[in-house]
Amino acid sequence: MTDIRETDVVTNSMNTASTDNGRDTVSLYQGILDAVCRMHERALRADWLGVECCAHDYEASVRRLREQGPADTRPESVRRRCRAILLEILSHDAAVRDLVGPAQARLGDLIASATQQRKLMKSYGAHGAILPGSCSWV
């Protein structure tokens, strides 16, 4: 998942040239918000593949926002709107991270358990018994 910081996004997008007086910038922010809301909805359902798919949209929107070149300063109304959307983005992003963290920890535990189980099976055989000839004292 892309890690966004308020200062990165505000700085890069508030100084963007556009003939529409900021509507493009607001639309990009709205696209990021839409993507992170979809990620949050899917994370609540533990639909991790869905979260990953939405993360691609999220990252693409952030990339488009960053690619806007510097130019005239946006009107205050546009900056206020973008900041309000950004606060929503950051709130949903934090909620997704709160849901993903425990799921990642569970996955890590499963992987560690499977690794330990493979080592035990290799040491003691598939059925957990000591096989003849596997120990020097048998």
Image (cartoon, grey):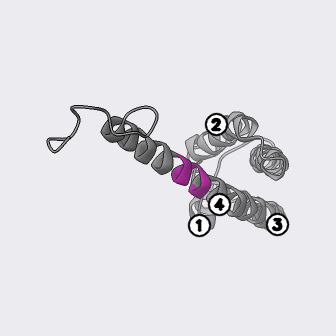
Label 3, secondary structure: give it.
helix
Which is nearer the N-term, disc 2 or disc 4? 2
Span of residues in magenta: 105-110
- Per the picture, the main secondary structure of the magenta-coloured stretch is helix
Query: Residue 78 in the image: x percent, y percent?
Result: 81, 60
| Residue 10 within the magenta-colored segment of the rendering | no
- Are discs 1 and 3 less than 8 Å apart at CB? no
| Viewer-nearest residue: 10 or 71 | 10
Residue 107 in the magenta stretch? The answer is yes
The answer to which image quadrant residue 3 occupies is bottom right
Classify 89 as above or below 22: below
> Which of the two discs, 4 and 3, sits closer to the camera?
4
Towards the viewer: 129 or 30 = 129
Label 2: how many Cα within 10 Å (few below 14, some 14–19, many 20+): some
Residue for badge 4: 102
Question: At x 70% / y 35%, what residue is drawn?
Answer: 49
Residue 131 at x, y percent in the picture: 31, 33
- Residue carrying label 2: 60
Q: Badge 1 is on which residue?
A: 7
